[in-house]
Amino acid sequence: KKPYRIAVIPGDGIGKEVMPEGLRVIEAAAKKHGVAVQFDHFDFSSYDYYEKHGQMMPDDWKTQIGSHDAIYFGAVGWPAKIADHVSLWGSLIKFRREFDQYVNLRPVRLMPGVLSPLAGRKPGDIDFWVVRENTEGEYSSVGGRMFPDTDREFVTQQTVMTRTGVDRILKFAFELAQSRPKKHLTSATKSNGISITMPYWDERVEAMAKNYPGVKWDKYHIDILTANFVLHPDWFDVVVGSNLFGDILSDLGPACTGTIGIAPSGNINPERNFPSVFEPVHGSAPDIAGQGIANPIGMIWSGAMMLEHLGEKTAAQSIVGAIERTLGERTLRTRDLGGNADTEACGKAVADMV
Amino acid sequence: KKPYRIAVIPGDGIGKEVMPEGLRVIEAAAKKHGVAVQFDHFDFSSYDYYEKHGQMMPDDWKTQIGSHDAIYFGAVGWPAKIADHVSLWGSLIKFRREFDQYVNLRPVRLMPGVLSPLAGRKPGDIDFWVVRENTEGEYSSVGGRMFPDTDREFVTQQTVMTRTGVDRILKFAFELAQSRPKKHLTSATKSNGISITMPYWDERVEAMAKNYPGVKWDKYHIDILTANFVLHPDWFDVVVGSNLFGDILSDLGPACTGTIGIAPSGNINPERNFPSVFEPVHGSAPDIAGQGIANPIGMIWSGAMMLEHLGEKTAAQSIVGAIERTLGERTLRTRDLGGNADTEACGKAVADMV
Ligand SMILES: CC(C)[C@H](C(=O)O)[C@@H](O)C(=O)O
Ligand SMILES: CC(C)[C@H](C(=O)O)[C@@H](O)C(=O)O
């Protein structure tokens, strides 16, 4: 069997520090479970690259990484040095759009060793997935400004939802719900206030639900849904939302499980016409970069999601299990979780346990 | 001094049950503090009215209530009987737009006797205001559908932000921040993803901040801001957001303080060219209507906000104090808060203590 070809892009800040731990753990799991992987390293999609070349990525970036089986990504962005719309829209958002990664998938799971800010919630109580539409919706580029610098000035920006775009994300979410024991899907809407696009979203949910009679589904307006994440996180199994609503829920969800510092994510093209990107939810965190104290769990967990996406379930699950055992030991956790391990010690601990 | 003329609209469901308690408490506070109020009752903006007349409000509703000093509003909506876009857009949203109530104001305050879902948070720890733009932004009516019922189908809806609309809500928020001891304003944005309207919002915040050198301000993207509501609710003093972001934050905030069942709100026209609407955040709750168990605190607290808006600070503060003392006693709280009082007993308790 040919090895999986993984494009490795550490990016900026702590992205560079957590990446080696991610690779270490994938190598350990691959060895143990007889999976062959090949890592190809790229320095673009980083501030360093931008400084040298005046752009975030080379012109032929799609040729360089477009035929890989997956992209393993650290973190990008350095607000003090480079505007977000240059760094993020010049890399991350480009991947999502040009590789048609229309699913943004994130687990919301309360792990051992992590204290939830929600009173009395224990590992096992919170365990669901947020499925976010990742290519259209509120993140459109259609709009503009009129009457600039006058009292009549106004700006508009369109939310765009296509039949194709909405149906495929809903299909993914219903399939995921159907594969889980609870078979429960929750749709995020705001059709009582946003009166054109959101009723359309609701309409497509209703139509798609007909294909999945085994899935129980419900919907909540985004305002009360965020309230319910806090009040009743145990109500959820799979939650699907538009680009913006999914973005909000997939930060709020991890916050309810104690930290966004360990959450992983996948930017997925389910048809595998293009490589998918797997990256920790945390950013490049310039404030703690270079100290060796960054928590590598988000990076490592993203590696597990990548292996799962490649079809290597056993190796993926062995990593998630090793993460849980590592987090359960105070001496193996990093400081942000009240432990005393540094980045490398934590990564090695996970690698030892896969 | 002429009495304040208040238009009283109980609306649907538990709106009808909590309204008498709201009136009882306002009357008690008015009497005690020498404030003259006159209540005029209206039966429209309710499902009952709609059933009889085929519309939510009479054609001359603006004449009937447009010259009142304020509108005291229960709750509207009955999803099983009438679509939200008919009931809400036929009343509540009409008030906001036609009476130019461009500020939606809600306190986020952890009260005695209410258990926060956030571990270890005590009354006093969470105490801030959410200021929401209430007339434009994401709640626009501009957009439509193309290629219906084909694979090419798509819908669009514009977010619209005007200089007038953005500046006036920011001015209100900065003024409010300046009047508070901490003088701290937080702006909700998403300019890293929503690339036209949100950078404009940021730009206007920056411009407005120049007029308020005494106010410390910061901004967060809405995703991490919702996370920070859960992780660090003590960071906030005044939070300002667009129509949609304000909507989300003003449900999430009260959820972090234990219940949206007691939160009040004001839909305010600060210039007093039109009456403002004061209403509890909870809806009509058809599932518990008619049982006499609804919690009247949201209605009563909204009455305090109304008196404050009318300039009657002392009477307003006496109500808030009475609410705190009532909530502090288990026997005076309603069941949703672990007490055993019914709606009326709870309302009477507050009235006795103003
Ligand atoms: C009912 C709905 C249209 C409304 C809104 O979104 O504005 C409600 O959620 C609110 O916050 O008052
Ligand atoms: C950085 C930003 C553009 C991005 C988004 O909003 O999509 C981030 O918040 C995320 O969730 O990956």
Image (cartoon, coloured by chain):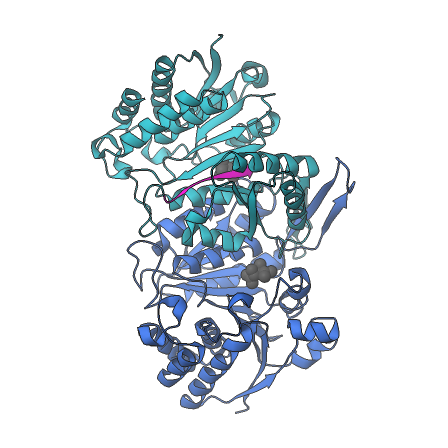
Chain colours: A cyan, B blue
Of the pair A284 and A269, the residue shown nearer to us: A269
Residue at the (46%, 71%) spot, across then down: B298
Ligand 1 is found in which quarter of the picture?
bottom right
Check if residue B88 falls in the magenta segment: no
Q: Tell me if I can see residue B311 in this picture.
A: no
Where does residue B334 sit, x and y in percent of width and height? 39, 72
Residue at the (53%, 48%) spot, across then down: B202
Residue at the (53%, 71%) spot, across then down: B289
The number of numbered badges drawn on the structure is 0
Of the pair A200 and B311, the residue shown nearer to us: A200
SS majority, magenta = strand
User: Which residue lies most toward the top here?
Assistant: A1
Where does residue A333 sit, x and y in percent of width and height? 26, 33
Above or below, A178 relative to B239? above
Q: Is residue A321 left or right of residue B174?
A: left
Above or below, A1 relative to A108? above
Q: Is residue A331 left or right of residue B134?
A: left
Q: Tell me if I can see residue B91 in this picture.
A: yes
Start and end of the magenta stretch?
A125-133
Where does residue B6 sit, x and y in percent of width and height? 57, 82
**Which of the 4 image quadrants contains residue B34?**
bottom left
**Which of the 4 image quadrants contains residue B111?**
bottom left
Q: Quadrant of the C terminus of chain B?
A: bottom left
Where does residue B100 sit, x and y in percent of width and height? 63, 68
Q: Is residue A162 left or right of residue A218?
A: right
Q: Is residue A103 left or right of residue B318?
A: right
